[in-house]
Image: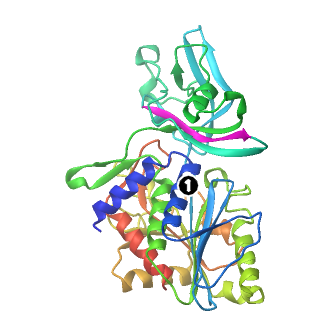
Amino acid sequence: MSFTEITKEMFEFIKKSPTCYHAVKNATDRLEKAGFLALSEKEDFELKYGKKYYVVRNDSSVIAFSIPKNPAKGFRITASHSDSPCFKLKENPEVTLENAYVKFNVEKYGGMILSTWLDRPLSVAGRVVIKEDNALVTKLVDFEENLCIIPNVAIHFNREMNKGVEYNPQVDMQPLWSGNKEDKIISLIAEKLEVDADRILGTDLFVYNNQDPCFVGKDRAFIGAPRIDDLGCVYGTLEGFLNSENENYITMYCVFDHEEVGSRTRQGADSDFLETVIRRMGAALGCERMLPKMLADSLLISADNGHALHPNHPEKSDGSNHPLLNSGMVIKYHGNQQYTTDAYTGAVVKDICKKNEIPYQTYHNRSDIMGGSTLGNISISHCSIPSADIGLPQLAMHSAFETAGTKDLEALVNFVKNFYVY
């Protein structure tokens, strides 16, 4: 498969994954097609050697694993995240103005570049909880159509706009979605799902950028898409996971929610999800006493995107560790361990890349610019596993429409396939 074909498949994954819930559902659909069996945390894990399984927590995080036919030495794990910065609808979201405008009352989710959400087609998706007989049932909803828009203020009303505007999320960022004061989003959901509105008891709804991913530039050198951070890695690690086998190690594919807001939730990387699955796996396979030894002989790859050198602001990047688009996957370092790569784990990543002719680059923050953290250091605080941080190089991280290189996804997929058999 060429790098263009892989990128097109990622485009489809992103289009079908407007929220964390849809991303996990699309990932589990692929896992089931590949023969993975679903487990429930509410039931005992009944596992067999040579089989493949997955478990979902709160609809937005998933851990899948493939068990070799014989007792394993340890684990090979990748972790990425299902969420991206966006707007979340509040309860009772309709705000009416002059009986002519109906807006959504929203709040920020994650560290957004607010200006990028203005004047572009937006839609709404998420999950709803419905009462069916005596059970509460979760259903996903995606309106797909251009349901709303956040209009900018005309420059005639603010002549200083191009000198920089500080947007107020409560005032400036409410999406306009209807001209009928009687319209309610719950009614629209009920119609789409063909249920009575009074049976809908809960919602987690998000406004998302409804623009399609696309190629940009001469010879399709670049890609533009919403949610490349981190659906690029969710897709890339899944592709590598499904196309690899290891006879000596249990391979695991992890996708966590809430990375963009700190991971400190029951389905985030700072939960017991990974630790619990590993412990329950050990108990079900009869190797629980061996887990400390197995964890010491394990590797975890935290896959979350990194900042590429900006063409208009190269001064924002480190002088000797600034990745470029289309020059390979990124290995991320940080002296204060915001990224977990060290001499040993970095050497492992480079060894895999060199053996398989996979292009790679290194990334450091400028020493005078605060960087963000990601999944690696949080995950290994619960399971002590040697870890490295990698990702795709990209521009405009946390924009409503991000930019990346067409060729880099192929490098990531090839690395993950070879990591799982290392």
Quadrant in which residue 352 is drawn: bottom left
Q: Name the residue under label 1.
A: 25
Magenta segment range? 121-132
Position of residue 220 measured from the top left corner of the image (x, y, whole percent): 24, 53
Is residue 366 in view from this perspective? no
Queried whether the magenta region covers residue 128, the answer comes back as yes
Classify mark 1: helix, strand or loop.
helix
For the N terminus, the quadrant is bottom left
Q: Is residue 6 left or right of residue 258?
A: left
The residue lying toward the viewer, choosing from 359 and 198, is 198
**x, y percent for residue 259:** 62, 55
**Residue 183: x percent and y percent?**
59, 18
- Residue at position x 67%, y 68% in the image: 379
Residue 73 placement, left or right of 395: right
Q: In which quarter of the image is residue 46?
A: bottom right
Could you say which is closer to the camera, residue 125 or residue 368?
125
